[in-house]
Image (cartoon, rainbow, N blue to C red):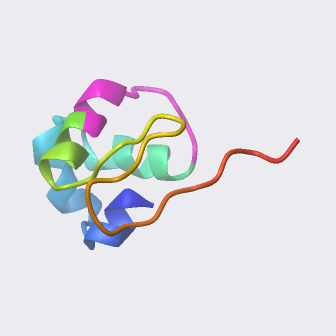
Amino acid sequence: MAKAALGVENSDFAEPTGLYRNTLKKLDKGEREGFNGPAVRLALEGMGVQFLEVGAQAEGVGVALKGAKE
């Protein structure tokens, strides 16, 4: 979702994460093999994405997903 909001393609995202485009494509499909969460998070934060903990407020305009309904 964050990559789409930024308009970033896997070819552009591979270098800042240090991951291969094929690995990123697998992540897009929900596969976790070769997943490097910290690298992906740091790259997205460097591009302006803000990750929020439950109850946190964003520092600017944006979107967030609500928690799962029980």
Is 52 placed above or below 63 here? above
Quadrant (top left/top right/bottom left/bottom right) for the N terminus: bottom left
Would residue 38 be counted in the magenta stretch? yes
> Which residue is depicted at the point 29% across and 48% down?
50
Residue 21 picture location, percent across and down: 28, 49
> Which residue is depicted at the point 21% across and 45% down?
45
Would residue 34 be counted in the magenta stretch? yes
Q: 7 or 67, which lies in front?
A: 67
Q: 59 or 63, which lies in front?
A: 59
Is 40 placed above or below 36 here? below
Residue 33 picture location, percent across and down: 48, 27
User: Left or right: where does residue 43 sit relative to residue 58?
Assistant: left
Quadrant (top left/top right/bottom left/bottom right) for the C terminus: top right
How many numbered discs sit on the rendered protein? Answer: 0
Residue 8 picture location, percent across and down: 24, 66
Q: 22 or 50, which lies in front?
A: 50
Residue 39 picture location, percent across and down: 23, 30
> Which residue is depicted at the point 13% across and 46% down?
46
Q: Which residues make up the magenta segment?
A: 30-41
Displayed quadrant of residue 62: bottom left
Q: Can residue 36 be seen by looking at this rendering?
A: no
Is 16 placed above or below 28 here? above
Displayed quadrant of residue 7: bottom left
